[in-house]
Image (cartoon, rainbow, N blue to C red):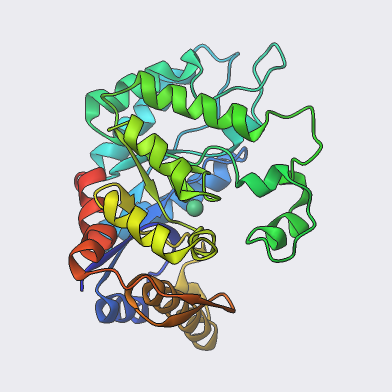
């Protein structure tokens, strides 16, 4: 079966990577993440661009743009020129990261939200170029909840990354405020294809995702980094959700391997390949198997999706929602 991993960060430039992708029938969609250090995020993005240029059968990429500079009158000239170059050189999407809504502030001290009219020149440009917008807006709901349940899929992340843990932080927008801003943007831009990364930060309940998919025909979601959230919900309900919205859900893993594999030693490279293959096989088993499967150390019921539904999830939706991919 041919598959696209529609959300990850994997610098696999070695023939061993190519052999694994061939074996698994995989094409990879590498996503740019614009962090405050521009030189650093551009260097990573250059890797995604290089891979897609060298091996377009196995790699494609999603562009990003530098964070808002409200005091820079040339900001949008610079951003739009950069994006035009990226799309001309093959990028088939544009990503906005969670720092919008949770970190970047406006001159008046308030948080810059994703539906702020400030971004209109970018959204107008994406619509004009018929490029899809990938939004990682917000965080899992657990980010705003007390860190007390080690069984929560996000317990480890917030234990290890307390700077992103928002419980009790009255000085930051709430999950509901961030989601509402994202929903307003999706509603006011019906001509723009928008993909909500990480199950649109509504990972805790597929019914919440379904509400948005019913409301917004221009909206889809990817599963990246949220398989365990699905696996923690009732398997019959999740199966029905994926079947009902079979043209709106894109498979993604969100694995992160930013270093080129050609720079690793042979044994490091082998270790990496073993890990990524195991991760993909584990994720595929959950969607495909009718038996109990292991998802990150938990025994859960496989979804046993029909081949036709799997093809939408793994392949056709990525092609529909990112034309050119
Ligand atoms: Zn990611």
Q: In this picture, is 254 found above or below 198?
A: below
Residue 185 visible to an observer of this rendering: yes
Tally of numbered tags: 0
Q: x%, y% of residue 108?
A: 70, 11
Name the image quarter holding residue 303.
bottom left
Q: Residue at x 28, y 38 (%)?
A: 87
Pick the front one: 303 or 180: 303
Q: In this picture, is 63 found above or below 296?
A: above
Name the image quarter holding residue 190.
top left
Q: Residue at x 51, y 11 (%)?
A: 73
- Identify the image quadrant of the N terminus: bottom left
Q: Residue at x 41, y 17 (%)?
A: 120
Q: In the visual, does 259 lie left or right of 129?
A: right
Q: x%, y% of residue 92?
A: 28, 43
Q: Residue at x 67, y 49 (%)?
A: 142
Which residue is most to the bottom? 267
Q: In this picture, is 188 found above or below 312?
A: above
Q: x%, y% of residue 217?
A: 27, 33
Q: x%, y% of residue 218?
A: 29, 32
Residue 56 visible to an observer of this rendering: no
Pick the front one: 218 or 164: 218
Name the image quarter holding residue 22.
bottom left
Q: In the visual, does 183 lie left or right of 241?
A: right
């Amino acid at each position: 079966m041919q598959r696209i991993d529609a959300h990850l960060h994997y610098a696999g430039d070695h023939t061993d990577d190519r052999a694994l992708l061939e074996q698994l029938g995989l094409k990879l969609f590498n996503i740019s993440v614009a962090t405050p250090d521009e030189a650093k995020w551009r260097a990573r993005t250059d890797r995604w661009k290089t891979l897609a240029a060298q091996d377009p059968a196995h790699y494609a990429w999603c562009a990003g743009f530098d964070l808002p500079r409200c005091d820079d009158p040339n900001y949008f000239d610079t951003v739009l020129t950069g994006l035009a170059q990226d799309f001309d050189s093959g990028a088939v999407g544009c990503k906005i990261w969670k720092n919008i809504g949770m970190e970047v502030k406006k001159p008046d001290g308030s948080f810059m939200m994703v539906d702020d009219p400030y971004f209109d020149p970018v959204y107008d440009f994406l619509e004009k170029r018929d490029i899809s917008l990938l939004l990682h807006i917000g965080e899992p709901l657990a980010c705003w909840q007390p860190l007390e349940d080690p069984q929560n899929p996000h317990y480890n992340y917030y234990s290890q990354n307390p700077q992103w843990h928002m419980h009790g932080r009255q000085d930051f927008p709430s999950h509901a405020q961030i989601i509402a801003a994202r929903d307003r943007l999706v509603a006011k831009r019906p001509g723009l294809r928008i993909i909500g990364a990480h199950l649109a930060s509504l990972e805790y309940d597929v019914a919440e995702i379904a509400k948005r998919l019913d409301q917004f025909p221009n909206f889809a979601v990817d599963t990246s980094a949220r398989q365990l959230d699905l696996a923690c919900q009732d398997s019959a309900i999740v199966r029905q959700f994926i079947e009902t919205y079979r043209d709106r859900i894109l498979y993604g893993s969100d694995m992160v391997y930013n270093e080129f594999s050609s720079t690793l030693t042979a044994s490091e490279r082998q270790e990496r390949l073993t890990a990524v293959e195991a991760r993909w096989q584990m994720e595929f088993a959950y969607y495909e198997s009718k038996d109990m499967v292991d998802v990150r150390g938990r025994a859960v019921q496989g979804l046993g999706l029909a081949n036709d539904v799997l093809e939408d999830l793994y392949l056709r939706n990525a092609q529909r929602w990112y034309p050119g991919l």
